[in-house]
């Protein structure tokens, strides 16, 4: 079970980048991602909630403008990242080689990302 696979075909050349899901989504990696998000100014859930109430009470976060510069990343706590990783691994078990992205550009370049 390799995990995610990025396949790019351009000018007759094919590049395949395997990404081992278990290596990318282990507890150490998730902790580092969460630390990086916090280090670069991503807001905490509490700050987001307080700002939402100031901007537009009762509106969804993406409409209220409360997410600020971090956008949806401000909601990515370590617990949320762990839950996301578990769901990605569960989807891999259930669906196998699920195609997440399959794009062909106007110049013929093809990009395909499978789970």
Image: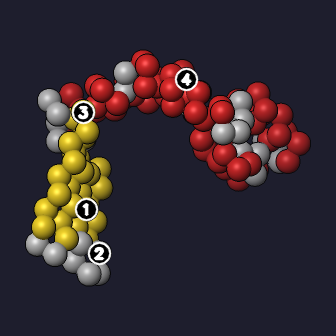
Query: Are the residues at dot 1 and dot 3 in contact (C-beta closer than 8 Å)?
Result: no
Image vertical order of residue 20 relative to residue 114, above or below? above
Indicate the position of residue 40 as horizontal and vertical percent values. Answer: 66, 39
* Residue occupying the far bottom of the picture: 107
- Chain-order first, disc 4 or disc 2: 4
- Chain-order first, disc 2 or disc 3: 3
- Chain-order first, disc 2 or disc 1: 2
The local crowd at label 2, few if under 14, some if 14 to 19, many if 20 or more residues have their Cα within 10 Å, is: few
**CA–CA distance between discs 2 and 3?**
27 Å
Q: Which residue is mark 3?
A: 20
Q: Quadrant of residue 18?
A: top left
Report whether residue 98 is seen: no
Residue 105: numbered disc: 2
Image vertical order of residue 9 relative to residue 53, above or below? below
Q: Quadrant of residue 49?
A: top right
Query: Are the residues at dot 2 and dot 3 in contact (C-beta closer than 8 Å)?
Result: no
The residue under the point 28% across, 31% down is 21
**CA–CA distance between discs 2 and 1?**
8 Å
- The reply, left or right, for residue 19 in relation to residue 50 is left
Query: Are the residues at dot 1 and dot 4 in contact (C-beta closer than 8 Å)?
Result: no
């Amino acid at each position: 079970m390799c995990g995610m696979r990025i396949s790019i075909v351009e000018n007759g050349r094919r590049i395949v980048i395997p990404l081992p899901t278990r290596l990318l989504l282990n507890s150490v990696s998730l902790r580092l991602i969460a630390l990086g998000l916090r280090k670069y100014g991503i807001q905490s859930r509490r700050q987001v909630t307080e700002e939402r109430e100031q901007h537009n009470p009762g509106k969804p976060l993406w409409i209220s403008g409360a997410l600020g510069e971090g956008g949806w990343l401000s909601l990515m706590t370590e617990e949320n990242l762990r839950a996301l990783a578990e769901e990605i691994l569960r989807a891999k078990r259930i669906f196998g080689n699920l195609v997440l992205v399959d794009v062909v550009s106007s110049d013929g370049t093809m990009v395909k990302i499978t789970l």
